[in-house]
Amino acid sequence: MGTSDKSMVMLGCFDTKGEDFSYLLKSLKALGQQVITINTGVMGTSVDFPIDVDQDAVAQASGAGLEAIRDSGDRGKAVELMGKGAAKILEDLASRDMIKGVIGMGGGGGTYIILEAMQAVPLGIPKFCLSTVVAKDLSRQIGVKDITLMSSVVDVAGLNSISRLLIRQAASAITAMADTKVGALEESKRNIAISMFGNTTKCVDKCTELLKEKGYEVMAFHATGVGGATMESLIREGVFDAVLDVTTTELADELCGGILSAGPDRLTAATEMGLPQIVVPGCLDMVNFAQMDTLPEQYRSRQLYSWAPDVTLMRTNVTENETLGKQLVDKLTGARAPVEILLPLKGISQIDSEGDIFYDPRADDALFRSIKENAKGQLPVVEMDAHINDEAFAKSLVDRLLKLMD
């Protein structure tokens, strides 16, 4: 279906922002857009435009009736439920290939509902939110989605010369984004995801070079928590054909409370989706924290390294590595496609090599031993007498991945 056959979705609280949404709708239609309107407000609504999905339908989609939401008097719960219901509505519309873009406006509660609903919309469908709270940290609400935020400057509470201008600009922006002609990601069947960190850059750069020579498109994800979570999300959306997970350091942050955790689902998507994957315990020798004085008290006597003024690395120990080895194997067990674990025996990060700051053969051995013992009879484990950033290790990673894909 071409974009001309699809509709723009306009969603938000029409009960309190009716005048603003009426103007946004007129602006979209003036740009030639077909529009599906979704009302996420819970109070009585009277607007001068048709509502395609009313508040009752949104509430029902959340699993709760509108009257129950109203009667509870719990604003926070109402916002949560209407966001959940709107996400279900958008998920259904997206599954039927009806959406070319999604736009919403709101204050604090309205923005939460809009961003929650947009989580259900796949990558590549533009998502635009005009909001009063853009200056606030919305990273949790945005998650890993390709959402564009724009400050409303004035409150979304009735039209004035500023709001009219910005609403028209928002309508023009989402229209231009939706009408941009690019090749769909799904059309390429040669996409490989790869995870990286500063401490594994040399390995990842070489792997990328070798894969590109073979005609593959390589998309690198920085293992900063959001990066790993984004990679997992895109794997589940069917963007990739294989995964070269060189840098699994986010597992260590999840275990030890570091600042770069990608959550408990890290390293599960390729296993569940049936993608060939090569996995390396890259940078499992470290946990990431911010400035040195922000470290939790229990870690202040540990081996630490200031990677940058705002980045403090903590060396993982034997006990943690035994746990990490088991977790890594557990997440890969039951994979629906070929998977291999490669162990670089001479070090798993740039600073884990003989004579360097995190060189600790005993801790590395605990990790390798845990992986091998837990994988025995379940997953193939390949040991290489190489450092993770050695060219020979990168070449082996690529060769073995291509064989798995075949």
Image (cartoon, helix red, strand yellow):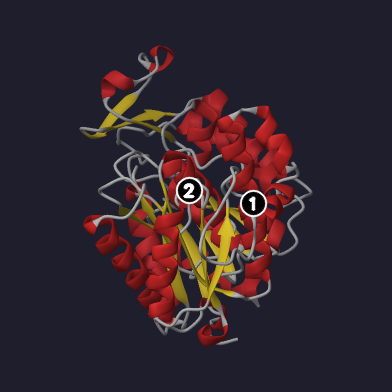
Against 22, residue 7 (above or below) is: below
Left or right? Give the position of 247 relative to 176. right
Gap in Å between the C-alphas at discs 1 and 2? 25 Å
Q: Residue at x 39, y 64 (%)?
A: 23
Residue 360, horizontal then vertical, whole percent: 42, 31
Q: Disc 2 on helix, strand or loop? A: loop
- The quadrant of the image that shows the N terminus is bottom right
Left or right? Give the position of 78 relative to 11. right
Against 41, residue 53 (above or below) is: below
Q: Residue at x 44, y 36 (%)?
A: 285
The residue pinned by badge 2 equals: 143
Q: Residue at x 29, y 42 (%)?
A: 135
Q: Residue at x 40, y 65 (%)?
A: 24
The residue pinned by badge 1 equals: 55
Q: Quadrant of residue 22?
A: bottom left
Left or right? Give the position of 156 relative to 73. left
* Nearer to the camera, 161 or 120: 161
Residue 176 visible? The answer is yes
Q: Residues within 10 Å of mark 2 (few under 14, many from 20)?
A: some
Q: Amino acid at mark 1?
A: Gln
Q: Earlier in the sequence, mark 1 or mark 2?
A: 1
Left or right? Give the position of 97 relative to 188. right
